[in-house]
Amino acid sequence: KAGVTQTPRYLIKTRGQQVTLSCSPISGHRSVSWYQQTPGQGLQFLFEYFSETQRNKGNFPGRFSGRQFSNSRSEMNVSTLELGDSALYLCASSPRAGSTNEKLFFGSGTQLSVL
Amino acid sequence: QQQVKQSPQSLIVQKGGISIINCAYENTAFDYFPWYQQFPGKGPALLIAIRPDVSEKKEGRFTISFNKSAKQFSLHIMDSQPGDSATYFCAASMNTGFQKLVFGTGTRLLVSP
């Protein structure tokens, strides 16, 4: 079974631009979560999607948004990029939502650099 | 209240030694405590997890010790190997019906040969 696939692997953008990151969960997994990882803040929860609905959102500005498609694939978008948005963005999938005891399977992430 | 504090930030252990990483939390609503292992260039992978109704859980060389009254939990890696060199994150979550892990800041472990 293929793991969680995130594309692109690396991305370089300039301030003010917007970016879209993609995540394909493990086949059969319907819940997708996104996390931001930085050296200073560690891993921080962005949002969770299940059945195309955002179920939970972390403490990030509205510039960060996401969506989930009917095939469970997910995208996240960051508009008006700031230098501080430089981070590794991780996507995680699990078979179902509704239980925080579910094992999360992480992808390798998209490394975003904002210049 | 949502924080999970992790220490040490980095750790060097000789091969065959015991690696110990500690975490503390404030929110007593947390009811699931996983540990994740992350290698460079990879995403975190679940290593072992515990719920507060048990004080210890062991899987191979990895053991979680949990102290509910002190609101602390720790990861012990017995007979540490160079292949264990990675960054380890503790985390916690609440049974709110939503998937949301609160992570510690991570411990970079180096096991010297």
Image: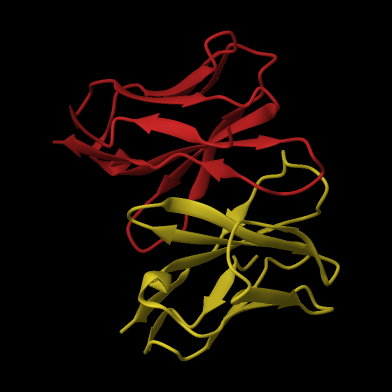
Q: Position of residue B59 (x, y in %)?
A: 52, 25
B106 left or right of B18 in image: right
Which residue is drawn at the image coordinates 30% and 23% (left, top)? B79
Which residue is drawn at the image coordinates 68% and 75% (left, top)? A66
Q: Position of residue A90 (x, y in %)?
A: 52, 64
Which residue is drawn at the image coordinates 44% and 22% (left, top)? B74
Q: Quadrant of residue A12?
A: bottom left
Chain corresponding to yellow in the figure: A
Q: Residue furthest top?
A: B69
Chain corresponding to red in the figure: B
Measured along the vertical axis of the image, is residue A60 above or below residue B37? below
Measured along the vertical axis of the image, is residue A20 above or below residue B51? below
Which residue is drawn at the image coordinates 44% and 26% (left, top)? B23
Measured along the vertical axis of the image, is residue A18 above or below residue A33? below
Q: Position of residue A36 (x, y in %)?
A: 49, 62
Is there any visible trace of residue B64 in the rendered image?
no
Quarter the N terminus of chain B occupies: top right
Q: Position of residue A70 (x, y in %)?
A: 84, 78
Relative to the observer, which residue lies in front, A13 or B62? Answer: A13
A102 left or right of A87 in image: right
A16 left or right of B84 in image: right
Quarter the C terminus of chain B occupies: top left
Relative to the observer, which residue lies in front, A2 or B9? Answer: B9
Q: Residue furthest left?
A: B113
Is there any visible trace of residue B11 in the rendered image?
yes
